[in-house]
Image (cartoon, rainbow, N blue to C red):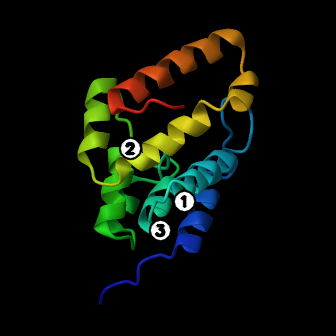
Amino acid sequence: MTQQPLTLIEVEALARAAHEGQSDKAGRPYAEHLAAVAEGVRLRGGSPEQQAAAWLHDAIEDEALSLTWLDGAALPQHVKEMVLAVTKRPGEPVERYAARVLATPGALLIKESDLAHNSDPVRLSLLDDPTRERLSAKYAYVRSLLGLTQP
């Protein structure tokens, strides 16, 4: 018997619960970042599947959810592929990561929204100078690899 796919509302609730208690580099609740990325995907014309992947974009990388969970989750395969595409692997060169994002249909929009939120000047202003400078340079390099010109 096939499971009904999780709805976007269910994916959001699951992602919020999985990241409960986590905070971003500025000390803000991590769910705020997830919500901003998912909303950015929506505003950029992303599909509900891309929005679902946006809610889950850091779940594996941050160990909020496991690869085993993702494999068995009631999600379309395309959503799982997008989540895996934007999941950084330990020790992976950023160039390989960017190539995988570009090679996976739908993943670039999620990463674009993620980078836009990560590069938000208000968000960056909450960080100390060395961290802000390091992250700004990192995000600019990833944007260049992905062919994205705007933060």
For image coordinates 66% across by 43% down, the residue present is: 22
Residue where numbered disc 1 is placed: 42
Q: Quadrant of the N terminus?
A: bottom left
Q: Earlier in the sequence, mark 3 or mark 1?
A: 1
- The three-letter amino acid code for the residue at tag 1 is Arg
Which residue is more in the foreground, 51 or 150? 150
Kindly check if marks 1 and 2 are in contact, taking CB atoms under 8 A apart as contact.
no
Which residue matches tag 3?
48
- Is residue 99 positioned above or below 20 on the image? above
Q: Which residue is mark 2?
A: 86
Looking at the image, the residue that sits furthest to the bottom is 1
- Tell me the SS state at disc 1: helix
Q: Return the x and y of residue 41 as percentages of the image width and height.
A: 52, 54
Q: Earlier in the sequence, mark 1 or mark 2?
A: 1
Residue 63 x/y as whole percent: 48, 45
Q: Are there few (<14), some (14-19), or many (20+) residues within 10 Å of tag 3?
A: some
Q: Residue 144 at x, y = what percent?
A: 38, 24
